[in-house]
Image (cartoon, helix red, strand yellow):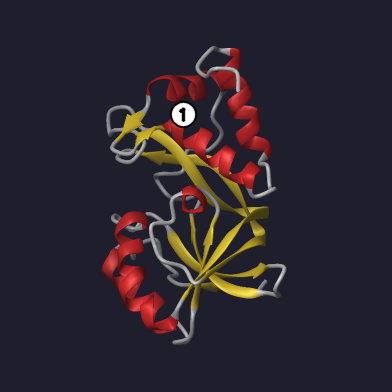
Amino acid sequence: MDETLLHESLQLRDPVRLLQQVLRQWDRGDLWVFGYGSLIWRPEFEAEEQRPAQVHGYHRALRMRSRVNRGTPERPGLVYALLPGGCCRGVVYRLAQERVEEELPRLWVREMPTGVYDPRWLRCRTPGGPVRALAFTLSRRSPSYTGHLSEDELLEVLRHARGRYGSTLEYLLHTATALRCHGMPDRESEKLLALARRHRLLDER
């Protein structure tokens, strides 16, 4: 796979340093960003173009603790992470060359305030041909990685976890809906929504 690890050591958690590494490895042309979760339904940057895309070697999983956006330190929520193995369908966004140095730091504030992700350049297949896109991946060695969660643990999070951007349940619903609208329904998302409905956490919809 055509990918470049943007930092080799889990010791390098400084978000500013990681952004500088990305900018050094940027080829100074238009920059593509791969979205697999909330970036699909709330990108918060101006893109010149977007395309459906598929990445091989990584998959989407609701295995990342969220202590601010979708939960609190006392009651962490969950968000999707891009983990090694399998494949993932999502959306790639093209940032115009002249806007990269303005838009990328704003994206960094949202995605990388604590340096939790491992930014990587991944080869993405799109209807218009392959592109090299920046993606925010998660190491299984990260303290934010949950590992396997039982059904009871998931239900506890879906019932109670809420952060500055809303609840984990709302995040899950928005992500599943966006993926469906893009013609790429996600099996895990649909399974979790079915679980929530069985336990009357969601209206039938």
| Residue 155 to residue 113: above or below | above
Of all residues, the one furthest to the bottom in this rendering is: 28
* Residue 22 x %, y %: 40, 75
* Residue 51 x %, y %: 62, 64
Q: Is residue 3 visible?
A: no
| Residue 200 to residue 36: above or below | above
Mark 1 element type: helix
* Residue 99 x %, y %: 37, 77
Q: Residue at x 29, y 55 (%)?
A: 114
- Which image quadrant for residue 159? top left
Crowdedness of circle 1 by 10 Å Cα count: few (<14), some, many (20+)?
many
Report the number of numbered marks: 1
* Residue 138 x %, y %: 48, 54
User: On the rendered structure, is 54 left or right of 116?
Assistant: right
Q: Can residue 175 be seen in this view?
A: yes
- Which image quadrant for residue 78? top left
**Pick the front one: 173 or 25:** 173
> Which quadrant of the figure contains the N terminus?
bottom right
Residue that mark 1 sits on: 169
Residue type highlighted by circle 1: Leu
User: On the rendered structure, is 127 left or right of 69?
Assistant: right
> Which quadrant of the figure contains the C terminus?
top right
**Pick the front one: 56 or 148:** 56
User: On the rendered structure, is 2 left or right of 37?
Assistant: right
| Residue 6 to residue 107: above or below | below
